[in-house]
Image (cartoon, rainbow, N blue to C red):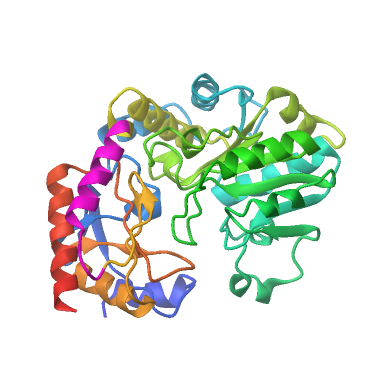
Amino acid sequence: MSHLQEDFYRYQAQTTAFASAFEVSHAKGSYIYGKDGKAYLDFASGVSANTLGHSHPKILDALREQIDKHLHVMVYGEYAQEKPVQLCKKLAELLPAPLDTTYLVNSGAEAIDGSIKLAKRVTGRNQIISARMAYHGNTHGALSVSGNEDFKRAFRPLLPNVDFIEFNNFDDIEKITTKTAGIILESIQGAAGFIQPKDGWLKAVRKRCDEVGALLILDEIQPGFGRTGSLFAFEHYDAIPDILVMGKGMGGGMPIGAFTASYEHMKHLQANPKLGHITTFGGNPVVAASALAVLEEITTTDLIPQTLEKEKLFRELLDHPKILSFPGKGLMLAPELASAELTLDVAKKCMDRGLIVFWLLYETQFLRITPPLTISEEEIRKGCAIINEVLDTI
């Protein structure tokens, strides 16, 4: 064990007893380079965060340009700064009505918390509904609306008046009532196995919210920013949310989150009480510069439609008898193996051969394949050959 690894285990708080402590030298494009001198093809992209891969020149240029001007200057919402304003305006131009006003925060989980507060404030109600097996983050608010009790039990009591329905269950939609402030759903359930809404279910949820005056909050933290073949996954399912939550791939490797709603809804955070949500570093100009560069790149190239072509290639190449199912959409894919133990073994053996894959948070029998949108056909073929080779040896 190196001195760096020893210090990593001793001084940096760990969240599992089995962190790999892989030592990173540098990263570029679709590769992470280890201090062992080897190149590792990255099929995880920082768990869906590195939308444009590593060290993308347009992101680096945007960061350098902003760093040369200024870093943090004032708490959120007080000063007009070019990059944060441009980012919010660009989102308004790209999103459907009424989603035209964005609150920039530091992470997806914070954005979830902010969206819950906003739904309560707009409606004057306090019931929040979520889905079983949902994952929305690990702050107390986000954990409260996540749907796996194994991750929550030790931290109770959590938020009161949170109830759960079954994702894709039409009968459960009736549980959304005039007491409901908002229902929060992932547009594609991530930790549960990359589960898509089926047969117009999300559209039916939207209709029910309109009937009872509840707000629909859609969590696009993972599928957003082009990963599924549209800018946001809800565009596939004909259900525009009242509040849109984003994060992860939004920053292209920089820490950011946001929630977007109508101008009228967002005004509720200005009074009764004032400072309805507040953050020191949300809207940081350097981070906003990176996010703006990501947004401009994916909306002025063919990267987004190409995700669906790349999905076809993955499905064609990973046609292996040990893959039991293959849920997901675009470059948010999860081949299912026979057990969690098998998936962990496959991930380790892939790493030994120079390929980084990961697993899902709840259903760990699924292998995570969420590469950068910039991944090339050649790199897809190379990585899939490694996965098939590993599966052949097990």
Drawn side of residue 318 relative to residue 285, left or right: left
Camera-nearest residue between 57 and 389 = 389
Q: Please, what is the dominant secondary structure of the magenta stretch?
A: helix
Drawn side of residue 182 relative to residue 99, left or right: right
Q: From the top left corner, tell me how far across and down residue 91 is, in percent.
A: 51, 26
Residue ID at (62%, 35%): 241
Drawn side of residue 91 relative to residue 19, left or right: right
Is residue 67 something one can see in this rendering? no
Is residue 290 something one can see in this rendering? yes
Residue 311 inside the magenta-drawn segment? yes
Residues rendered magenta in the picture: 305-322
Q: Quadrant of the C terminus?
A: bottom left
Residue ID at (48%, 30%): 70
Q: From the top left corner, tell me how far across and down residue 52 is, in percent.
A: 31, 39
Figure quadrant of residue 359: bottom left
Q: Is residue 394 above or below residue 85?
A: below
Report the number of discs.
0
Q: From the top left corner, tell me how far across and down residue 40 is, in percent.
A: 19, 59
Residue 129 inside the magenta-drawn segment? no
Q: Quadrant of the N terminus?
A: bottom left
Q: From the top left corner, tell me how far across and down residue 201 is, in percent.
A: 58, 45
Camera-nearest residue between 264 and 53 = 264
Residue ID at (43%, 40%): 251
Residue ID at (47%, 56%): 190
Camera-nearest residue between 3 and 171 = 171
